[in-house]
Amino acid sequence: MTQTSKQDHVLIFDTTLRDGEQSPGATMSHNEKVEIAGLLDEMGVDIIEAGFPIASEGDFEAVRDIALNAKNSVICGLARASTNDIDRCWEAVKHAPRGRIHTFIGTSPLHRDITALTMDEMANKIHDTVTHARNLTDDVQWSPMDAIRTEHDYLCRVVEIAIKAGATTINIPDTVGYTIPRESSDIIKMLLQRVPGADEIIFATHCHNDLGMATANALAAVEAGARQIECTINGLGERAGNTALEEVVMALKVRNDVMPYSTRIDTTKIMNISRRVSQVSGFPVQYNKAIVGKNAFAHESGIHQDGMLKNKETFEIMRPQDVGLAGTSLPLGKHSGRAALRAKLDEMGFALADNQLKDVFVRFKDLADRKKEVFDDDLIALLRDSGAAE
Ligand code: KIV
Ligand code: ZN
């Protein structure tokens, strides 16, 4: 297992339990968080951001217990740019075989206004807090929150300060989901070119989905040189959510021909953890969600079902088994054709003669016009009505 990666390996940093839980209404219990962390560890997530230890006693205990149970993943906690936050964070993550402190401060003009710090004052604070974290552990991540809306010269300046103070990972957050792929890529390229020491550390990309571009922006950053993607299961997260883990991981797997980067994720565990996160967070997964939606591997129309029955690659770019599903589903509805009906009846053990199938198909279309989906029991009733079954 590797935690540092400079070539073609991309580290997966999951923040379902921190940024994901910040989604209004997604609060998880202590035991649920420990369970989800175990699943993330098992599936090969490199770094688990387990919470924000200073936020509450409950958050502290959850991060500490996740750290105590960690096997392969690095356990990370979030801390503001304050020594109290950083100390509390270390108290929780130090129990892991490998613990990380992730400290951040908003660097854009809007955030500097809120904190009432001048550029120089903020630069000093970054130096002091990263140095403090680095005195506790050699695994320190630093984020300039709202990096995308921070002046480029100032961004380069503070990134350089954080690297000199000992940060080993620099995360570039698109906090408000404002960027586009070209810009996401240009910022990473600029930092790699302009900041001394940039080639010694890992750049991370942390995208939000306000304009629906989180996955594209994260992948663009990787193509420019970022080697850590921050993401959540089902894209859970503040407002419109974060980059979805399942989307970036499957995109890197399916399009490895044009994005030759590997991850450690066992993709066959994706469906299970997606369902579990949906249950414990209370956030349903939309039917047409990429990779994990109920319809992601379902085909109803006649042309598609016929194609799928002949060659699955006609309408599927990845195997459902690769994300942990038993197989493709061909639900029967008004758009379905005769080939899918025959395949379904065969599967149910009814081998019909052509003239019988013709009759049942007419009855099926009539029913499908009145009903969203035709189930096995409906088909048995149709077969009985037509005399094709007892
Ligand atoms: O979106 C963001 O900027 C964050 C930071 C705390 C990294 O979540
Ligand atoms: Zn975030």
Image (cartoon, rainbow, N blue to C red):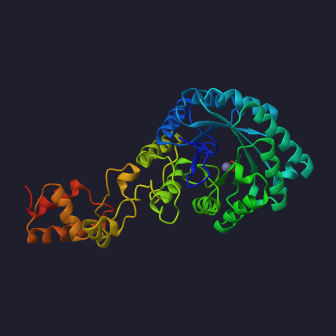
Is 273 located above or below residue 312 in the figure?
A: above
Give percent across and percent down for residue 312.
31, 64
The relative height of residue 104 versus residue 62 in the rendered view (above or below) is below
The quarter of the rendered structure image containing the C terminus is bottom left
Q: Is residue 203 left or right of residue 262?
A: right
Rendered position, 226 above or below 101: below
Residue 176 image position (x, y, % from top left) = 70, 57
Q: Which x, y percent locates residue 9?
A: 55, 52
- Can residue 225 be seen at all in this image of the molecule? yes
Q: Toward the viewer: 47 or 323?
A: 47
State the residue in front, 16 or 75: 75
**Image check: 6 left or right of 331?**
right
The residue at the point 84 percent across, 54 percent down is: 157
Counting every numbered tag in the picture gives 0
Q: Residue at x 37, y 59 (%)?
A: 297
Q: Is residue 171 visible?
A: no
- Residue 65 position, x and y percent, is 58, 27
Residue drawn at (46%, 43%) of the image? 273
Within the image, what quadrant is residue 386 found in? bottom left
Q: Residue at x 28, y 63 (%)?
A: 332
Image position of 116 (left or right of 336): right
Image quarter of residue 16: top right
